[in-house]
Amino acid sequence: MKKLCVLGGMFVFIFSCTSVESGRKGVEVSWGGRTNMEKVYSEGLVWGINWIWDDMIEYDVRERTMVKKFEFNDKNNMLTGVELSLDYNLNPNHVNKLHVKINDHETKIIKTLKSSAKEVVPQYTASELNLTKRQEAEDKISSILSEELPEFYIDFARVQLTDVDIPSQIAQTAEATAKQLELNKLALEKAQEAENNFRAAEWDAKTKDVLSQPKMLKLYELELQEKWIKKWDGSFGDNNVFGAEGTSILKGIK
């Protein structure tokens, strides 16, 4: 950020100054395009008449997080999606070298992250990366990054496997299996219902067949008579053949 500082009057320029914002480092680039490789500027105000023509290029050196998702074949040769989270920052002491040598540091980071994961992920199954071997895989990726990222003047704090997908083949198989189990369940319920209906019909037919036999019909009639007798209260009423109470034994005979 270039500023003109005036001392002693509005129209007299004694010297100029520039500044570097908080959380950043500054690289001095001369009017002719030469980068100062001797010094990196810290945050704050920087004085000097040269800032009338020189520029201060600022680089944010605070820690940031990059999250990227890639697809690799796992140990079982199944296509597996993995999400990686990288916490990193530009090396604050070498931003001048980065300015000169690295045109696009984010592209360098992405390529390095992808190549390291591509080397490590195929050593494990998707299940291992999800359940038992995730930390081990992260350590291996971290080891590769610690060797390669400094070449691009990048420091990193940590790398994490934040998500590991179920391989598409396994997901499709699981879905098909779930559907088949549901179909099997429905088929079993229908079969059980049909069997119950058949047994009920069979029992009904046998019962009717037994009751249709003469002996059984006689027993059935006797059973009905027995039930009627049990319900009788012992009275004949006025209209029976014996007449009402207090009359002759046979109705109509005096």
Image: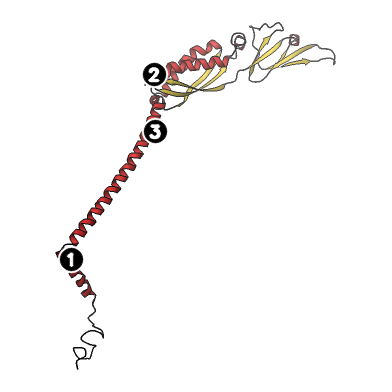
Q: Is 143 displayed left or right of 76 in the figure?
A: right
> Which quadrant of the view contains residue 12?
top right
Q: Is residue 90 visible?
A: no
Residue 87, relative to residue 254: is it above or below? above
Quadrant that contains the C terminus: bottom left
**What whole-number distance in Å separates the C-alpha atoms at marks 2 and 1?**
83 Å
Residue position for label 2:
123
> Which quadrant of the view contains residue 55?
top right
Instruction: Decide which of 21, 180 is in the foreground and name it.
Output: 180
Within 10 angstroms of label 3, few (less than 14), some, or many (20 or more) residues? few
Within 10 angstroms of label 2, few (less than 14), some, or many (20 or more) residues? some
Within 10 angstroms of label 1, few (less than 14), some, or many (20 or more) residues? few
Q: Is residue 217 visible?
A: yes
Amino acid type at circle 1 is Leu
Residue position for label 3:
175
**What whole-number distance in Å separates the C-alpha atoms at marks 2 and 3?**
26 Å
Q: Give percent across and percent down for residue 241.
A: 21, 85
Q: Residue at x 29, y 45 (%)?
A: 191
Amino acid type at circle 2 is Gln
- Where residue 217 is drawn, which disc sits there? 1
Q: Residue at x 39, y 18 (%)?
A: 123
Instruction: Decide which of 125, 219 is in the foreground and name it.
Output: 219
Q: Residue at x 74, y 14 (%)?
A: 17
Q: Is 202 displayed left or right of 184 in the figure?
A: left
In this view, which residue lies farthest toward the bottom? Answer: 254
**What whole-number distance in Å separates the C-alpha atoms at marks 3 and 1?**
60 Å
Give the mark nearer the N terminus: 2 vs 3: 2
